[in-house]
Amino acid sequence: MSQVPRFRTVLSCSLLVVSLGTAAAACSGSDSNPLASTPFDAGGQISFSGSKGHGKADPNKPLEITTKNGSGRITDVTATDASGRRLAGELSADGTRWHSTAPLAAGAHYTLRVAIENGRGRPGNRKFTFDTKSSSHRLNATFGPEAGAYGVGQPITAKLSAPVKAKADRAKVERALKVDSVPAVVGSWYWVDSKTLHYRPKEYWPAHSKINVHSNLNGIKITDKLYGGAAKPLKITTGDRLEALTDAGSDVMTVKRNGKVINTIPVTLGKPGFSTRNGVKVVLGKEYYVQMKSTSIGIAAGSSDSYDLPVYYATRVTWSGEYVHAAPWSVGSQGVANTSHGCTGMSTANATWFFNTFHKGDLVSVVGSAGDTMTPFDNGFGDWNLSWDKWRKGSALVAGKQAESSPTDTARLRPVAF
């Protein structure tokens, strides 16, 4: 008796499987479930306003998809260009019309996929491809610096081929300029002027980062007549975190690698009237030999402050002529007094070590000087002298006024030399 119920259970399951199989066979190929049917070619039931034949679509006109003679309704539309960018659009409530709500890219190749349902609910689809007309007015971007290895203070730059002034237009550009890094950082672009942007993280780049810069600007409508152009991508890396901090009160430079002190160097900075700039500077380059002349900074020949000297192992930190360099004539003052015309002077042995250790993008800072603070943009890379809050205000994607600074104020640009 105990096995009878078990037998009946198995038998019932078998009948259930057979019943389901029969039901499935009955549904296959039946019009009673149109969603199980193979989608039909909907080309004859829809039309779109894109290019006809071998023509190209006008990117200034919206794309429109409609059903013909009320034949069903549109259920989905995707329009994607060759870069993978999707075109935003809107479907009417009755499903008879879809139209783009964002401008098409110029000089682009689009793939359009449309899904519909006919009057009985049967699905259909159709794929179209078309091209848009090119624009002769292109906004190109050139990224800097050149590809290679840099210090952790190196900003990214973008130089535009035409000015962009309106904030809404700047926002379009800024969204398309991408900076990716490993490890990831929080960073932002800053509009230095209408043709120049700088990008930096909130903090310095992490040591040994990989940074990729690219643009999605190509074909994007910026203004009524200006479209984005191509941009060559950029890849750079960072090395160790190298920082040189000089205290003008003690005339000692402390050098750190990845936070650990690796050297202390007696130096001399700018004397009264030629005080070295305070703040963070970024190494711009290195020159084994520079002939420094006082006339280049407005000191008349023959005056008590005039000079014309060969200078060696010169590491540049401003475009106006501030260097860290060998100054064998002032060894007696190094670590004791400030006697230069604005540069950081040290012994030849120490300058050789500094020259061989520091590279473009490494950090050189001065505190306690009577000089002005390094300006952000007009004399090298003083980007790090803006607080993060002020830096963010230089972005077109952030609400509020741009940071109060004078990036093109040349009145504050005072050349210095040895």
Image (cartoon, rainbow, N blue to C red):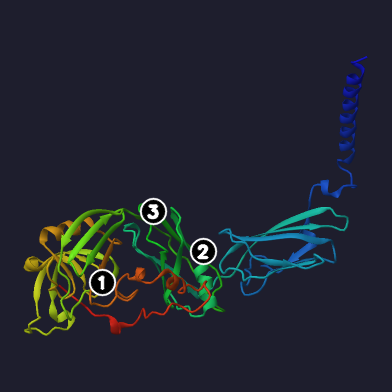
Q: Which mark is residue 209?
A: 3
Mark 1–mark 3 distance (CA, rounded to whole Å): 25 Å
- Mark closer to the observer (2, 1): 1
Could you tell me which residue is drawn at 45 percent across and 74 percent down? 394
**Quarter of image, res 407:** bottom left
The residue at the far front in this view is 249
The image position of residue 63, as x and y in percent, is 68, 69
Could you tell me which residue is drawn at 11 percent across and 61 percent down? 348
Closer-to-camera residue (220/253): 253
Closer-to-camera residue (342/178): 342
Residue type at mark 3 is: Ser
Residue identified by numbered label 2? 216
Residue identified by numbered label 1? 318
Residue type at mark 1 is: Thr
- Secondary structure beneath dot 2 equals loop
User: Which quarter of the image is occupied by the C terminus?
Assistant: bottom left
Disc 1 crowd, CA 10 A, few/some/many (<14, 14-19, 20+): many
Mark 2–mark 1 distance (CA, rounded to whole Å): 33 Å
Total number of numbered discs in the rendering: 3
Is 192 drawn above or below residue 129 in the view shown?
below
